[in-house]
Amino acid sequence: DVETLRFLTREQALEIADTVGTPAYAYSFETLKHQAEQALNFPNAYGLTVRFAMKACPNAAILKLFLSMGLHFDCSSIYEVRRAIAAGAKPEQCSLSSQELGDGFEELVAMGVKINCCSVLQLEKFVSKCPGKELGLRFNPGVGSGGTGKTNVGGPSSSFGIWHEFADKCSEIAKAGGCKVVRIHTHIGSGSDPAVWRKCTGLSIGLCEKFSEVTTLNLGGGYKVGRMASEKGTNLQTDCAVVKDVFEEFGQKHGRKLHMEIEPGTFLVANAGALVASVHDIVQTGTDQGHTFIKLDAGMTDVLRPSLYGAQHPLVVVPRDASRANEREKYVVCGHCCESGDLMTPAPGDPETLAPRTFAKAAPG
């Protein structure tokens, strides 16, 4: 099937190309608001904080929009914390969960930024630099899910978070430094199956039993987004309704009403943005196994996921000559880098394989 434009019109796409130039990013504030509202209505038992995983799109205008709607921020580096604060966020609205707990993190703690330690070494650094302070711990609960092995952020093949079997050791380290663990953080990614959501939430909330002072459980993000017309995304209100039940069951059993946090990133922005690029060349390889290639003035420098994961993104040819709109051709689309991996149309989950798609007939320019 031929993909169609989502929020831009043909006229708008051409206007952007002619006035702003290409490549250029364009965003739909209407779509951003709608997705944020969906996240803010995530089923919860005892309160909810939605944190935008800002690595998904740290555009300042988008940060300000989400801030105005009551969202907080999940930051994956000290630099992202500073960017969020520069956009108007208060330090206490920022949470840092990072593969690298960089120098100077203790200054952010003093400002009110919330830190989730993601390894035993990070915890030891925190206790040394910030004795007596509150913190969170990000755990790898032993399972995960993802569209590909590269996008799976839980389980034994993932480096993210503290392996769950080290929970008792972490408790001892925190207590020795007079630090209080008040947040447990996991990030599994759970698709659209309610049974999987219940299982994953149960594993995460089970970690809270080991830390009596925990008041918040952060379930992370990873909510499936249907980018292509044929793909189904996660419906937060129906697919995730069982999460509320798990929190209520824990509350009844342990007498603790845990606050919930979620960290959608892709879910909020994936279908709210478009990259407007120009066709600068079309070439053919004249064999039975050959292809017709569209070369863009953008590529892996602007959209990296297809090259990394074989991720599928909708692509639409917008002919300047409207009479070509109903003509169809098969193309492989590649970027402008002198790099064989700069491919916009890989096979699903396989960045090594070319997968021609049907488009409106293209022309340079």
Image (cartoon, helix red, strand yellow):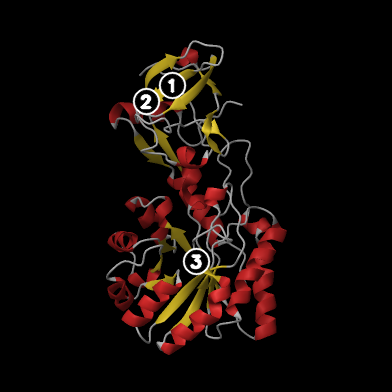
- Which residue position holds label 1? 294
Q: Residue at x 55, y 16 (%)?
A: 289
Q: Is residue 34 visible?
A: no
Q: Quadrant of the C terminus?
A: top left
In the depicted view, which residue is nearer to us: 41 or 157?
157
Q: Earlier in the sequence, mark 2 or mark 3?
A: 3
Q: Report how far apart the C-alphas of labels 1 and 2 lie in the structure.
A: 10 Å
Tell me where residue 213 appears, x and y as whole percent: 52, 85
- Which residue position holds label 2? 278
**Dot 2 lies on which element?**
loop
Q: Quadrant of the N terminus?
A: top right
**Which disc is residue 218 wearing?**
none
Foreground tag (1 vs 3): 3
Instruction: Characterize the local packing of mark 3: few (<14), some (14-19) or many (20 or more) Cα atoms within 10 angstroms.
Output: many
Instruction: Characterize the local packing of mark 1: few (<14), some (14-19) or many (20 or more) Cα atoms within 10 angstroms.
Output: many
**Dot 1 lies on which element?**
strand
Tell me where residue 184 appears, x and y as whole percent: 52, 74
**Dot 3 lies on which element?**
loop
Tell me where residue 92 appears, x and y as whole percent: 37, 72
